[in-house]
Image (cartoon, rainbow, N blue to C red):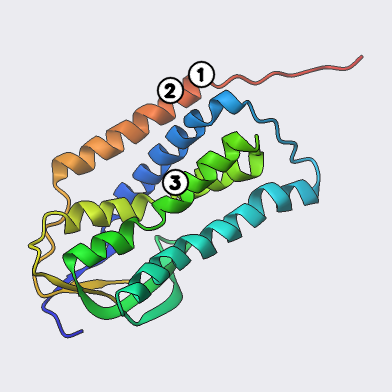
């Protein structure tokens, strides 16, 4: 898409990481009534409770973006980009220009996975689905930030996503410095709270 305006998520790396941390902590607190107990002593438990949920979340999260875009008749591509200095970020590229309203649905689609995972975690008393809920909810950070930006754009804006950069016929308003600071301050406050309340129990066997 030949458009004069562009948006790169790498420009909001700090905000996305901070928001992901906030969502990670809050989603964990939401699950606290279940009182899960998971033992990572073996390779299989790590595979079952960490790697498999992570792979499932990545595939389903991006798949929901892609499915929604396809329902709107868009051409979809998948890829992996370097986010920050070490993180590898999977992405769904939607190169077909779409109006803002359709993009709002595409961006918000993975919330469905969090809702389903939350219900299954409590219904089945399942730690596995609880972890899926936490992973996917924290993974919504970038989507929520884009949603905040697109929400301030005019309805007739045509937008396309090339994976690492979004392009539009209208300017992207960006995130205000005030909102950026609020996100980072909340993340820092949560981190300090966790550190100050973190307890380590050492058991000595005689």
- The residue beneath circle 1 is 197
Question: Is residue 35 left or right of 180 when viewed as pictured?
Answer: right
Residue 172: quadrant of the picture: bottom left
Question: Is residue 183 left or right of 159 when viewed as pictured?
Answer: right
Q: Which residue is the extreme one toward the bottom?
A: 2
Front-most of 100 and 168? 100
| 56 up-or-down from 182: above or below | below
Query: Are dots 2 and 1 in contact, CB under 8 Å?
Result: yes
Tell me the SS state at disc 1.
Answer: helix
The residue located at (81%, 45%) in the rendering is: 42
Quadrant where the C terminus sits is top right
Q: Label 2: how many residues lie within 10 Å, few (<14), some (14-19) or many (20+)? A: few
The residue located at (44%, 46%) in the rendering is: 137
Tell me the SS state at disc 2.
Answer: helix
Q: Position of residue 8 (x, y in %)?
A: 26, 66
Q: Which mark is residue 12?
A: none
Q: Position of residue 54 (x, y in %)?
A: 58, 55
Query: Are dots 3 and 2 in contact, CB under 8 Å?
Result: no
| 69 up-or-down from 18: above or below | below
The residue located at (32%, 76%) in the rendering is: 94
Judge whether residue 133 can be spotted in this image: yes
Q: Position of residue 132 (x, y in %)?
A: 56, 48
Q: Position of residue 179 (x, y in %)?
A: 19, 41
Q: Label 3: how many residues lie within 10 Å, few (<14), some (14-19) or many (20+)? A: many
| 143 up-or-down from 189: above or below | below
- The residue beneath circle 3 is 137
Judge whether residue 163 can be spotted in this image: no
Tell me the SS state at disc 3.
Answer: helix
Q: Nearer the viewer, mark 3 or mark 2?
A: 3
Q: Which residue is the extreme one toward the top?
A: 206
- The residue beneath circle 2 is 193
């Amino acid at each position: 898409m030949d458009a004069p305006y562009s948006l790169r998520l790498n420009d909001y790396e700090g905000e996305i990481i901070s928001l992901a941390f906030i969502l990670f902590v809050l989603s964990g607190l939401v699950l606290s009534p279940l009182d899960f107990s998971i033992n990572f002593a073996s390779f299989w438990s790590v595979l079952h409770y960490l790697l498999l949920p992570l792979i499932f979340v990545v595939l389903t999260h991006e798949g929901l973006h892609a499915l929604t875009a396809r329902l709107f008749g868009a051409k979809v591509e998948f890829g992996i980009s370097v986010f920050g200095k070490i993180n590898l970020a999977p992405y769904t590229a939607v190169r077909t220009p779409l109006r803002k309203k359709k993009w709002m649905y595409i961006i918000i689609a993975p919330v469905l996975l969090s809702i389903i995972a939350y219900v299954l975690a409590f219904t089945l008393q399942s730690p596995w689905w609880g972890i899926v809920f936490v992973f996917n909810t924290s993974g919504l950070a970038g989507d929520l930030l884009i949603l905040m930006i697109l929400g301030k754009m005019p309805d007739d804006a045509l937008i396309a996503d090339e994976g690492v950069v979004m392009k539009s016929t209208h300017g992207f308003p960006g995130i205000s410095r005030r909102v950026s600071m609020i996100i980072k301050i909340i993340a820092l406050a949560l981190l300090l709270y966790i550190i100050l309340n973190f307890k380590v129990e050492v058991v000595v066997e005689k």
